[in-house]
Structures are given as structure tokens and as C-alpha cells.
Amino acid sequence: MTTKQKEKWNLKNLRPIIGLTVVSLLICGLFFPLLMTGIGQVFFPYQANGELAHLPNGQAVGSYFIAQNFTLPIFFHTRNETASPSASGVDPDITLQDAYSQIPRISNATGISADSLMTIVNQNQEGTFWIFGSPYVDPLQLNLLLINDYPSVYSNFTG
């Protein structure tokens, strides 16, 4: 086989490989993701947009899927200074013990009774499957309830 024949053979064999690569890239990297995004937006718009949480004035303040960074002493914080059971650190939930440990700080900062805060935490605990894991709460949900239930304390956040 001459050098010219080898070059023709290489080009002849490379053309379908490159073509298949480009077609696969377009289908898997562009068309399929756009199709799935469109289907998600049409049939599941709330979920597809990240299940955003809103204040009473309509302002989006976060997602129920990702931990929010609350730093003011009047709010439940997603992570205490101690180690978190979440491997990624973005899990939005905290243990009941973590929520209970924050009640005195919130009570002192807001004037809301510790009993009222304890009731809010207990009413919003979420369970786990049977005996696996421990009960937990979502600080974002607790904070939104505080804003809604105590508008005089949280007037800066109600618009």
C-alpha cells in the first residue's frame, strides 16, 4: 500500500468517526437536555425551577432543596458550629437536637417564648423511614413560619 493510498484510507475511515462524534454530541449534549428541560418546564414548573421558597411579599429567598445561609440570630441556622451529619454540607435539613439548641438564641433575640418556638419545631419535624435515621426539620421552612406567624418581630422581611 502506497502512502497516498494510506492517506485516502485514513480519511475514508475518519469521516464516519468524526460524523458520529458530532451527531452524538449534538443529540446527547444539546437536543436531549433541551427536550428534558422543556418537558420539565411544561409538566413540572415548580419542581423544575428548584422549588423556590418565597416571603409573603413574593420575594424568592431560597430553595427547599439546598441549605440556605441564615446568619442573623433571629433565624434558625442550617448548620451549627459543630459537625454536620450531612456529607455534602448542602443538605437543607438539621436534626431536632440542632433545632432545639438554637431556640434559646432565637428566643433571646426576638422575644418569642421558647415554648412557642419548641411547638413550631415539633409541629414541623419530618420523619424518617421506619427506624432508619433520626427526625429532622427544615430551617428554611421554620424561618418562613416565623416570618408569617410573627410579622411584628420580622417586619423587615414581610415587605
Image (tube, helix red, strand yellow):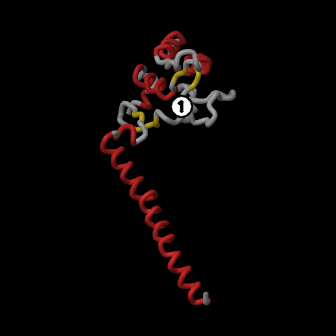
Q: Position of residue 35 (x, y in %)?
A: 36, 52
Q: Position of residue 19 (x, y in %)?
A: 46, 70
Q: Is residue 159 above or below residue 132?
A: below
Residue positioned most to the top: 115
Residue positioned most to the left: 42
Q: Is residue 120 above or below residue 38?
A: above
**Residue shown at the point (61%, 17%) measured from the top left:** 97
Three-letter code, disc 1:
Pro
Closer to the camera in the image, 75 or 152: 75
From the image, which quarter does the C terminus lie in? Answer: top left
**Residue shown at the point (43%, 23%) measured from the top left:** 145
Total residue callouts:
1
From the image, which quarter does the N terminus lie in? Answer: bottom right
Q: Position of residue 25 (x, y in %)?
A: 47, 62
**Residue shown at the point (49%, 75%) measured from the top left:** 15
Which residue is labeled 1 in the image? Answer: 92
Residue positioned most to the front: 1
Closer to the camera in the image, 133 or 68: 133
- For label 1, the SS is loop
Q: Is residue 158 left or right of residue 82?
A: left
Q: Is residue 105 left or right of residue 63?
A: right
Q: Residues within 10 Å of mark 1 (few under 14, many from 20)?
A: many
Q: Position of residue 109 (x, y in %)?
A: 56, 21
**Residue shown at the point (46%, 26%) measured from the top left:** 141
